Amino acid sequence: MIEVKDLSKTYKVGTDIVKAVDNVSLKVEKGEFLSIVGHSGSGKTTFLSLIGGLTKPDSGTVSIEGTDIWSISDNKLSELRNLKINFIYQFSSLIPTLDVIENVLLPTAFSRDKDKKYCDYAMELIETVGIQDKIKSYPSQLSGGQQRRAAIARAFINRPSIILADEPTGDLDEETEIEIMNLFKEMNKNNGITFLIVTHSSELAKHTNKQYRMLNGKLNEA
Ligand SMILES: Nc1ncnc2c1ncn2[C@@H]1O[C@H](COP(=O)(O)OP(=O)(O)O)[C@@H](O)[C@H]1O
Ligand SMILES: [Mg+2]
């Protein structure tokens, strides 16, 4: 599903050189549910954006289902991103002027076959994330946890095969964090979606099937 080989990314800030990702290799099988734990500044976000096709590596390769994503055209890369990969961030913000169902449907707005099937799936996802009583509510009328659930439902609407989640529960209380993690687990089990979850918490990481640790740009099995 994902194969990363000898991946490196260095940033130059003034005269400083930061090896954000340092010669990392990783194989992720289809349907895996894994986490990466590391201190702030250890390179987690950079690593996810290299895998997700947002940041170009200095060296090394990233293959998604056999396609070397950094050797294809920009158009092909954005197509692959749209079809297969989705990101969930700590601040995946909803559009304040749209209600929950409109927010969840937003990624399908440019789709050619706009039909009822999306609405049905959106309803199903909203139910899965447990905010079915908030379909017509606006983001300002939701709690932080409910907003996160809506953003998660939105991340699934295009049926991605890979979810890259960067501290998706970062600002939530412990109980809600675990609920969100269980939600991911359910999506992983029922839909076979591959999950790569970055979290600051090794406690939370225990909920995943495989754990890695990132330190100074290096990735190791935990
Ligand atoms: N766009 C950038 N320009 C310069 N330095 C960056 C940039 N992005 C990240 N870095 C540096 O790379 C290192 C890794 O950052 P990051 O990937 O954001 O780590 P994490 O997500 O684990 O906190 C840090 O030292 C950070 O300051
Ligand atoms: Mg980060």
Image: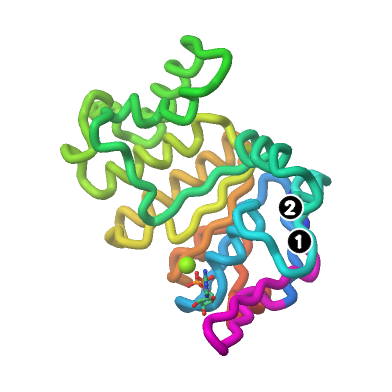
Report if residue 136 is visible in the image: yes
- Of the pair 65 and 146, the residue shown nearer to us: 65
Residue 208 pos. (x, y %) = 55, 58
Density class for disc 2 (Cα within 10 Å; few <14, some 14-19, many ≥20) is: some
Q: Quadrant of the C terminus?
A: bottom right
Residue plotted at (51% across, 54% down)? 165
Q: CA distance from mark 2 to mark 1?
A: 7 Å
Q: Position of residue 44 (x, y in %)?
A: 55, 68
Q: Which residue carries the number 1 mark?
A: 4
Vertical placement of 35 versus 107: above or below?
A: below
- Residue drawn at x 62%, y 44% is 162
Residue 222 in view in this figure: no
Question: Is 84 on the left or on the right of 39, as rendered?
Answer: right
User: Does 15 appear above or below 205?
Assistant: below
Task: Say left or right for 50 vs 104.
Answer: right
In the rendering, at what x and y percent does residue 91 appear? Answer: 36, 53
Secondary structure state at the residue bearing disc 2: strand
Identify the residue position indicated by label 2 in the image: 2
Secondary element at tag 1: strand
Give the residue at x 61% y 36%: 82
The span shown in magenta is: 5-22
Say if the magenta span includes residue 103: no
Q: Which mark is residue 63?
A: none
**How far across and down, in percent of the image, does residue 58 sit?**
73, 69
Name the residue type under label 1. Answer: Val
Kindly indicate whether the residue at mark 1 contacts the one at mark 2 (C-beta within 8 angstroms): yes
